Image (cartoon, rainbow, N blue to C red):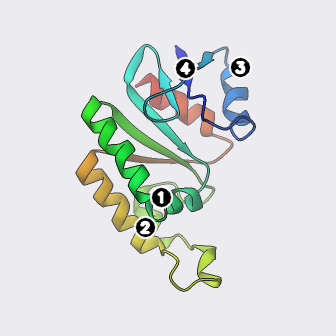
Amino acid sequence: MIVQIDTREHKGKNDHVIAFLDLNKIKWIRSKLVVGDYLNLENPRVVVDRKASMQEIAHNLTSDHERFKRECELAKELGYRLIILIEDETINRLEKVPSWYNYRKKFSPKAITGKQLHKIMITMSDRYGVEWRFSTRANYGRKLVEILEG
């Protein structure tokens, strides 16, 4: 397997992923992807978009919704299987998202709740075929490779 990593994937923020690939002697290259952050060159129809936290996906699905929606539409149009892999230490499956507590609620009563976020995620799955997966930071590299291997 050769993993292609999008050039826009922030260096330093994904060091744990690179370390896993290197440790397991999985080849990787940096090159711009049309959609997502990671893909297996031997199985290029599966694309993984890394989200560093529930807070990041909450931002993507609210403040940055139009951009995120366009990326999902493009993935669907191109025939990609788009998997969003979210790093979180407590949420490990989509059904647990309603229990997520958004710490921003302390500062802004209008901040999204876990229940609202869950509803948007379900809608994105229904409309665009987006798949939601979760992993702890420590297991992220392994989970990524499992997904990319198919």
Which amino acid type is shown beneath numbered disc 4? Val
The number of numbered discs placed on residues in the rendered structure image is: 4
The residues tagged by marks 2 and 1 sit, at their Cα atoms, a distance apart of 13 Å
114 in relation to 146, above or below: below
Residue at image mark 3: 22
Mark 1 or 3 closer to N-term? Answer: 3
Which amino acid type is shown beneath numbered disc 1? Asp
Task: Point out the frontmost of discs 4 and 1.
Answer: 1
Which amino acid type is shown beneath numbered disc 3? Asp
Residue at image mark 4: 3
Residue 4 horizontal side relative to residue 139, left or right: left
| Residue at 30% in and 51% down | 125
| Residue at 41% in and 40% down | 83
Task: Point out the frontmost of discs 1 and 3.
Answer: 1
Mark 2 or 1 closer to N-term? Answer: 1
Callout 1: SS? loop
Kindly check if marks 1 and 3 are in contact, taking CB atoms under 8 A apart as contact.
Answer: no
